[in-house]
Amino acid sequence: MVEHGGFSENGWALSESDAYCASLTKSHYENFTVGSWLLPKEMLKHIYALYSYCRSVDDIGDEDLQESIGDLCSCHTDDNSSTNQLHQVEDLETSRRLCLLDQWESKLKSCYSGTPQHPVFVSLQRTIDEFNLPIDPFLKLIEANRMDQHTHRYSTYEQLLDYCDHSANPVGRLFLGIFGYRDVELNELSDAICTALQLTNFWQDVSRDYLRDRIYIPREDWIRFGCNENDFGPGAPSKNYRDMMRFQSARTMELYRRGSILADRLDGRVKLDVALFLKGGIAVLKTIKRQHYDVFTKRPILGKRRKVALFLNTWLAYKLGLRLQPKGRI
């Protein structure tokens, strides 16, 4: 157990670890200024710890290794066999990422055993202890990044949903957990929103992901709508591609619709934060539709005016005690 103001076995004081997590969060999360204002101040250290864990796992799995992992951990490959020398650079990088993810999982388990070995885990241990958070959501996030190392295409929608269950849904469950919400139904509503947000990000970044040799649209839907990999490359989208993305957007919107009552089931400012995530995701999906599913010419994003309007409308509804569930047809 790390005492407040005390040191862990590796010499990191809790105050230093909190500062580390706060700095990491603020340097990566562009919307944190607004988000931190919405949440109770006493909860910020826990939000910092959770975000820093998630950010660090994603960096190991997806970002430039030299720039992202810093002092997270080290991994050395001692295999000098001729077979290993024939591996392409990306294969060696994948092996290193998997090794680093294994080490991060080991650090997580050390955290749960009371011996945190990294500043993120020094802070995270307090959050885990205070809110009795289970290890499974943290492990799922690591596993999602392992999946990223091997899987660049998805055959079915069910396989894609399974990936979202590892990469997105645990974040929502951990967020609810630190605010005392453990109800099964609320977790399921959160899962629907988190999966929808993840899918929206995929549909928003089809062009970017293709350049990284990743396609998240299920292959079964390529076949259904007569598309092939050429439809994901540069250039104006084909009619078949637009029809396919109209289908993807419709079932993603259904997930938003399914989870849309969550905010009104919560209390305090946390309901406002959830409502903003929900409405922001829906707004991005509608922007994709307005661009006729052309994410190649221009990446669909929300401009500052749209973000401000969305925030003010949601904030006013919150202050007036109105329902935060989106009105009208989602």
Image: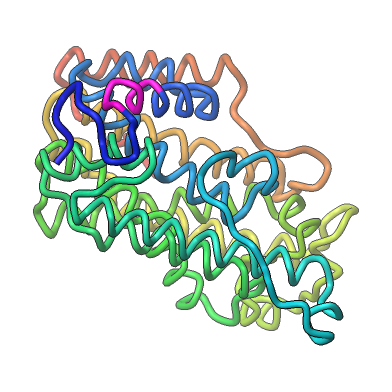
Q: Residue at x 76, y 48 (%)?
A: 294
Q: Quadrant of the N terminus?
A: top left
Relative horizontal placement of residue 265, taking residue 103 as reference (left or right): left
In the drawing, does residue 178 fall left or right of residue 65? left
* Residues shaded magenta: 13-19
- Residue 13, image quadrant: top left
Up the image or down, 126 lies above or below 172; here it is above
User: Where does the image place residue 9, in percent across and percent down from the top left?
Assistant: 27, 41
Above or below 37: residue 158: below
Residue placed at 48% from the left, 14% from the top?
A: 308
The residue drawn where x is 76% and y is 58% is: 212
Coordinates of residue 64 in the picture (x, y in percent): 70, 46
Q: Is residue 168 above or below residue 146?
A: above
- Does 177 appear in magenta? no
Residue 169, quarter of picture: bottom left
Magenta stretch: dominant secondary structure:
helix
Quick check: is 17 in the magenta stretch? yes
Which of the image's four quarters has the C terminus?
top left
